[in-house]
Amino acid sequence: MKDVSGGSAAELREMTGSRVAIHDGDAPALSGETKLKEVKGILSHIFTLMSKIMKFRLVKPDLLLKEGDEIGGFRVTHTPGHTAGHICLYRPGNFLFAGDALRSDKKGNPRAMSRVMTINIGEAEESARRIAGLEFDILLPGHGTPVIHDTSKKVRQYWDRLI
């Protein structure tokens, strides 16, 4: 199997024949029509180093997603903040693939994403509040341990404490 450097959607499409799907808010950055927001602070140094290792190739998406679309049995839930087009994939009552909308600690407790990992903290907080209104058993964050057992309740309680 060919090694995929940097998780490039272009390479994955070539290797598998799959289609590339992305929210229309992030599609221009993926295709190179617009630039990604510049990262500042210590993360700029980390991203500079990573960019030398990871070779991100621009790609035009095959499918533009928007709020409420269905893909692979999951509902697209637009959760901007990390990026303008960030999405969660939601199966009501079951799963929420949160990506970078939420994270969790080592004990499986939900947490907000770090301010340095968001392009718009206000939108990120509003997206997290929207997630707190959903019902699901398992939260699968992009960073951290899966959150299980009374998951929707844990997410709501976490946001209630922050407000």
Image: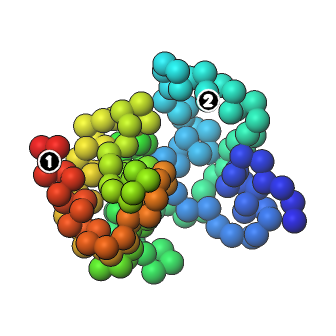
- The quadrant in which the C terminus is found is top left
Q: Residue at x 52, y 21 (%)?
A: 42
Task: Indicate whether 38 appears above or below 72.
Answer: above
Secondary structure found at label 2? helix
Q: Residue at x 32, y 49 (%)?
A: 111
Q: Amino acid at mark 1?
A: Arg
Secondary structure found at label 1? helix
Mark linked to residue 47: 2
Q: Is residue 74 visible?
A: yes
Task: Indicate whether 150 appears above or below 47.
Answer: below
Estimate the x, y position of residue 55 in percent, counting from the top left: 75, 40
Question: 89 or 106, which is in the foreground?
Answer: 106
Estimate the x, y position of residue 112 in percent, counting from the top left: 32, 45
How busy is the neighbourhood of tag 2: few (under 14 within 10 Å), some, or many (20 plus)? some
Q: Residue at x 38, y 64 (%)?
A: 147
Q: Residue at x 53, y 33 (%)?
A: 36
In the image, taking residue 76 as reference, residue 15 lies left or right, namely: right
Task: Indicate whether 19 appears above or below 130.
Answer: below
Question: 85 or 90, which is in the foreground?
Answer: 90
Mark linked to residue 161: 1
Alpha-carbon span between mark 1 and mark 2 = 33 Å
- Residue 12: image quadrant is bottom right
Estimate the x, y position of residue 83 in percent, counting from the top left: 43, 42
